[in-house]
Amino acid sequence: MHGCNRLRKNNWATNRQDQVFTWPEGNARLAKHLSKFVEGKNLSQHLVYDVNWNAQNVEVLVFDNQSQISKKITAEKVIFATPQFVNQHIFKGREWRNFHYSPWLLATLTLRNQFGGGDELAWDNVIFGAEGLGYINDQHQNLNQITGEKVITYYRSFSTADSKMARKRLYYMKDEALKKLVLDDLRLAHPEIEAHIIEIQFHKLGHGMISPVPDFIFGSEIQLAKEPIDDKIFFAHTDLSGISIFEEAFHQGIRAAKQMTGR
């Protein structure tokens, strides 16, 4: 899930250009803020593995990883804010054909301070002619006057017609192959980048985000996926918008809550 907040042409912007406002922890800042409203009411380290329901209530079976026991949670109604590739393993008949999720590779590079020369790195950097999506400056808007190493994160989506094969290919790629893939892209903009590398960490995301195909966002299947089950089980996730950004996650949560409460 991704998001970006932009502040536009206010009086404080003396150069009269668009400004970008971000948090160092990204969307985690928003998640942390929202978590305050469920403090003491949420259960972490719990895995849902089955759901049963009748006209009166819903029974959710969960495994408590801390106590290593299974529990049963009973509620009148339930919202599942989970992606469809998870729901299909919990509910029968929810194996949607057009919900495709591209695998992603993230590479976080720690670089010597001399990287980029004397110019300040932009927050979001898209490289012309590259295979990947570019990189972000993880220290954007750092207010420290003296900075040590620089940290950037490179993104690449393996969006193909066969996401399953792309996922398997990424899974089996070794670090050396991943390093070559990342540096081949970054060298297009920074030919001397290898001389500045201190460390590279790779992060593989098997289901990075929903990849909408033609006729998906306004198609019939996505509408069916939003429909509740017996007015007891409701669904909310960014993939029900077809675009994985925070704003859509927020919208889908509100939609499902209104649907459940009848508002």
Image (cartoon, helix red, strand yellow):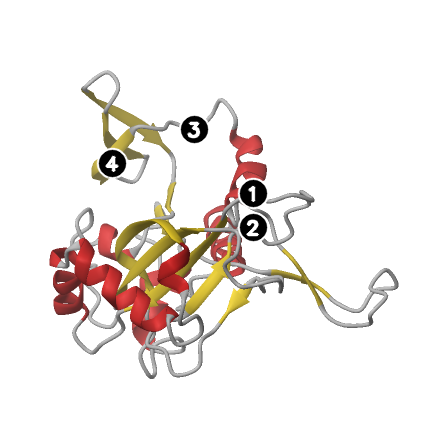
Residue at image coords 45%, 64%? 135
Q: Which residue is labeled 4 in the image? A: 48
Disc ID at residue 139: 2
Disc ID at residue 29: 1
Amino acid, disc 1: Arg
Task: Evaluate whether residue 176 shows in this view.
Answer: yes
Residue at image coords 37%, 72%? 187
Tag 4: Cα neighbours inside 10 Å, few (<14), some, or many (≥20)? Answer: some
Amino acid, disc 2: Gln
| Up-down relation of residue 191 to residue 103 (above or below) | below
At mark 1, the secondary structure is: helix
Q: Which residue is labeled 3 in the image? A: 42
Q: CA distance from mark 3 to mark 2?
A: 32 Å
Amino acid, disc 4: Val
- Contact between marks 1 and 3 (CB within 8 A): the answer is no
Amino acid, disc 3: Asn
The numbered mark, 3 or 2, whose residue comes first in the sequence reads: 3
At mark 4, the secondary structure is: strand
From the viewer's perspective, tell me whether residue 257 is left or right of residue 119: left
Tag 3: Cα neighbours inside 10 Å, few (<14), some, or many (≥20)? Answer: few
Q: CA distance from mark 1 to mark 3?
A: 18 Å
